[in-house]
Image: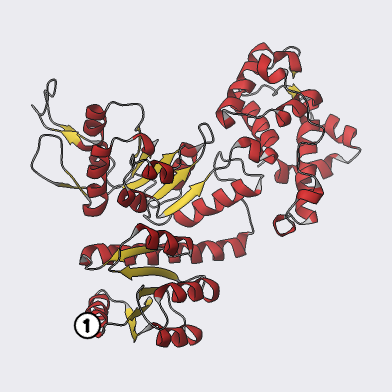
Amino acid sequence: MERILLVDDEPSILSVLSALLKAEGYEVMPVLGGDKAKVVLASEEFDLMLSDIRMSPVNGMELLKIAHNDRPTMSVIMLTAYGSVETAIEALKLGAFDYVTKPFKVDELLITVQRALEYNKALSENADLKAQLGTKYHLENIIAESPSMQNVCDMIKRVAPTDTTILIYGESGTGKELVAKAIHAQSRRKDKKFLAVNCAALPEPLLESEMFGHIKGAFTGATANKEGLFEAATGGTIFLDEIGAMPMSIQSKLLRVLQEKEVRRVGSNENISIDARVLAATNTRLEQLMKEGKFREDLYYRLSVIPIEIKSLRERIEDIMPLVYHILRKETPGGQTPPALDPEVCAILESYNWPGNVRELENAIKHAITFVKDNKITKDVLPPKIASTPIRTATRSPISDIDASKCKSLKAFIRAKEKDYLQQVLSHTGGDKEEAAKALKISLATLYRKLPETQE
């Protein structure tokens, strides 16, 4: 039974919330005032804390800081009658899971509590799994050699088992939809549909009909009833790509869908219950769009319960060559040997800025495979603007610039370097393991022993 710490300086609120949560089967400890709650937090364990913000002498923000530092595995939901954006931003920055404004809707509060506890459970289960299996970041087709992509894969494993709404940030071509599909594939909804819509690709009337459906006669050309993506994705996942391009009129309708779990088809007066998990993605900062009045603040907080940021490829050079080998294997017909890479090509690929990110890298490798000679990729078969890239003398940060707290262990660093080198040698020998072993001056048995670590 999950334990919930309930903190407020109004006895009536404590009484109502305590009765409500106990009726749902939770073990609840109501505490009057932040000063008493501070003492309780120091001595007892809880799965979740619901705390009012405006209290004296110890307010909810102080309790949130204590919880974040001393009880990192406990989720926190803030209760406030002052639903200002500033308060919400500060609470979320300090680590709050979510916030609920007073007077609150019972259903909304209970759903938020359930989501917080599910997220907590997912974190705990993932920690146990990592303790048993060790750290392994290759999720399906996601290449994750860099610390930032390892963190993305870790987040996928944490949030996938929940129904929490996720907002994925990243430049165009970084793989936002791939991450969304990985979340769906790891979730309990994996056997149901994954449906995606690009909010920037459709005009407003068509986007509304695509998402919510319409009834016959709703507009010119509506010759039959049509279910929208939210209905079609019931039990599964809907992915809203480029959410920042969504018109304001549709944003308000989407907010209602997220709050009420119901859709209303265009032209209809009837509400239809839906059960679809929502994942959204954007290549623009929604905070800036909010300042410009182009994105609703309330929708932003509904969508960004948990944000996941994918760094640009130029910020994670460690991923470039593993991605290249992955693309080569994928694009080479079965039974054939992938082309070898000239060392100069490797240096060029790590020096180029990749404004189009992984999508541009994939297109560059496909271009090279098309024009390859003697099954070896050289500089002259790369796209001209990439081939002309000046080779940097050092593609990694100098040691003096590295944050020591983020450094890999020496063992992990050596393993990563060994992996890169073995892949290059195998590529140069056309996949011939005997030739590779001779070139490496190791036994064939030693090479085979290392291959499971390098060819995941």
Picture quarter with the C terminus: top right
Seen at 80% across and 43% down, the residue is 418
Image position, residue 413 (x, y; %): 77, 50
Colouring chosen for the image of the structure: secondary structure
Q: Which residue is mark 1?
A: 12
Can residue 247 be seen here? The reply is: yes
Quadrant of res 408: bottom right
Q: Quick one: which residue is furthest to the front in this view?
A: 292
At x 62%, y 29%, the residue is: 354
| Amino acid residing under circle 1 | Ser
Foreground of the two, 350 or 426: 350
Residue 230 screen position, x and y as percent:
26, 41
Question: Hey, which quadrant is residue 404 in on the image?
Answer: bottom right
Q: Position of residue 312 (x, y in %)?
A: 59, 38
Above or below for 172 versus 271? above
Residue 296 point in image, percent of width and height: 31, 46
Residue 22 lies in quadrant: bottom left
Residue placed at 72% from the left, 18% from the top?
387
Residue 431 seen in the figure: no
Towards the viewer: 368 or 395: 395
| Quadrant occupied by the N terminus | bottom left
